[in-house]
Amino acid sequence: MPLYMSGSAMCSFIAFLSRTECQTSRISLCFHTVICFVILPYAKGFSERVANVLRGFSIKVAHKPIRTISNILKKPKDKIENEASRGIVYKIKCKDCDCVYVGQTSRALKTRMKEHTKAIATLDKNYFLAKHHMLNGHQIDLNNVEIIDRSSVWKQRLILEAWYSVRDRNMYNGIQ
């Protein structure tokens, strides 16, 4: 397939490239030269043509591979199961309405979910989820807990919990 770019398209392309980082160097007191570098993904045949055109505008081209070893090979570490995650901020949704509960824990998520399950079963008034279940008769979706952030620092988790709580309009805060 032949490469064709109209004059206006080439000018737009070069204008786009000119907004990239440039290095300025002085050759002498009177002359000032601007050398621009641009990094483009490499596509055999096309990249060489683009580099030749840009060379005429004093723009140097560096090519980067589209596929690298790191994105070809699988990640070496095993993924931690959500239930075993620690130091997290999580979100629990109600099955019957749009209310959500945001919480944080340093312990395993599985342990915290067992506590919520027990609180709902015993109708413990000290838990917001149990109150929502008791007052409205709604079912809490404890099987689809979403981890929304992570931090090993307790104060950071508290701030993140508060921030996500304020962000969500449907946050259940025990008043409903």
Image (tube, grey):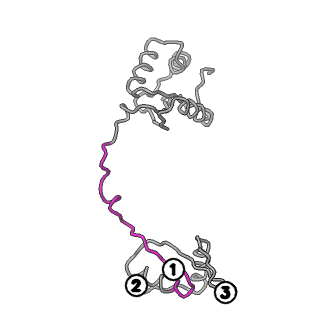
Could you tell me which secondary element the residue under label 3 belongs to? loop
Instruction: Quote the CA–CA distance across marks 2 and 3.
Output: 41 Å
- Residue 68 falls left or right of residue 96: left
Q: Which of 125/107 is in front?
A: 107
- The front one of 145 and 65 is 65
User: Crowding at label 3, few (<14), some or many (≥20) Cα neighbours within 10 Å?
Assistant: few
Quarter of the rendering occupied by the N terminus:
bottom left
Amino acid at the residue labelled 2: Met
Asked whether, in this view, residue 29 is left or right of residue 37, the answer is: right
Q: Quadrant of residue 106?
A: top left
| Residue sitting at x 53%, y 83% | 54
Q: With 24 as the anchor, is 157 left or right in this view? A: left
What numbered label is drawn on residue 31?
3
Q: Earlier in the sequence, mark 1 or mark 3?
A: 3
Q: At 44% across and 71% down in the image, what residue appears?
A: 41
Provide the residue designation for mark 1. 60
The amino acid marked with disc number 1 is Lys
Q: Which residues are magenta?
A: 53-78
